[in-house]
Image: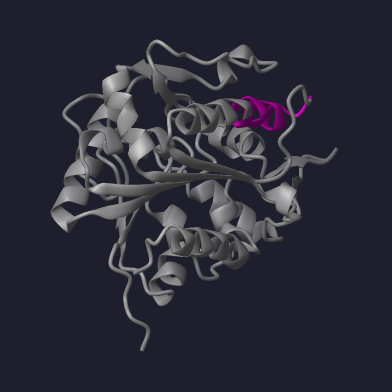
Amino acid sequence: MKTAAALPLVFQHGGAQSKRTWETRVDGHEGFNTLFLRAGYSVYLLDQPRTGESNLSTKAITPGTPWAGNPMYGDKTLYILSRVGHYDDKGNPVPNEQFPEGEAAYQAFEQSWTVGTGTLDNDLNANMLAQAVDKIGGAVVVTHSMGGTIGWRAALKTKGVKATIAYEPGGTEFLFPDDEMPKITKARFAPLSAPALGVPRSTWMALTEIPIVLYYGDHIKLGSRNVGEDKWGTGLAMARQFVDTINRHGGDATLVHLPDLGIRGNSHFLMGEKNNVKIMKLALKWLHEKGLDS
């Protein structure tokens, strides 16, 4: 029997998603939940406040939230923004190389979107994540998309966050010292440009005390006419500045762009695609290298 790793993994989902992100692939095959469990890690999946199976909110959802105000936003736009694929001349979804084929997988992807019961508050989400990590007794935090900022903010609130693994962080702010703000790389559709948030340097320095890794998939290209490829081009540009800033201050941050490793065809939902075992093993190798598996 494999000995359990000393540190558990706490999984934080992204925006308009839920813990389902980690449970299975969209075609029903094994997800990160059980893959990491069988690799020897205790696994905790959470639904952030106001989302999924979490508690109801005492604050009404913001009417301007696009996936709440317009159901077709999720049906079409999120498919493209997530770089899962595009549509052919007849309006049929055409997935990228690693996204499982077939209408059933497409439907499962569309049905995974979750409208929260209240306003998005990433400071609240970070507070709850920090409390969960402390209750567990310390953990590695694994995030996706908009969850990236939640994981990093939680690491500013508790020493219990021992490391963060971020899958395609973006959609909300990357954190920087407030006297060292980055250059914003503009998307063709400017509102999709990757944002940054300044925090006091003395607080921000906590990010230099833990190992951090960021993973990005394929089909990322600044200036592309595909709005999703362009959007994530701005995110990747911001991620590089984030990593460089941490390392310049003596930290340990790594950015992995999968095509640089010869791993091609992944979308924004790389943890749920056909090669998710290969993606998972990259994290296992990183955890081992950082001494976080024993």
Residue 137 horizontal/vertical position (percent)? 17, 56
* Closest to the observer, 144 or 101: 144
Which percent across, then down, holds residue 194?
55, 22
Classify the position of the N terminus by image quarter.
bottom left
The extreme top residue here reads 179
From the top left corner, tell me how far across and down residue 210 is, in percent. Answer: 36, 44
Viewed as shown, does residue 279 lie left or right of 150?
right
Closer to the camera, 25 or 146? Answer: 146
- Check if residue 228 falls in the magenta segment: yes
Describe residue 170's horizontal placement relative to residue 97 as left or right. Answer: left
Horizontal side of residue 96 vs 104, given as left or right: right
Q: Residue at x 56, y 51 (%)?
A: 109
Image quadrant occupied by the C terminus: bottom left
Q: Going 73% across and 25% down the picture, which residue do you hit?
A: 222
Which residue is farthest bottom?
A: 1
Residue farthest to the front, as pictured:
250
Magenta region, main secondary structure = helix
What range of the chain is rendered magenta?
225-236
54 or 173: nearer the eye? 173
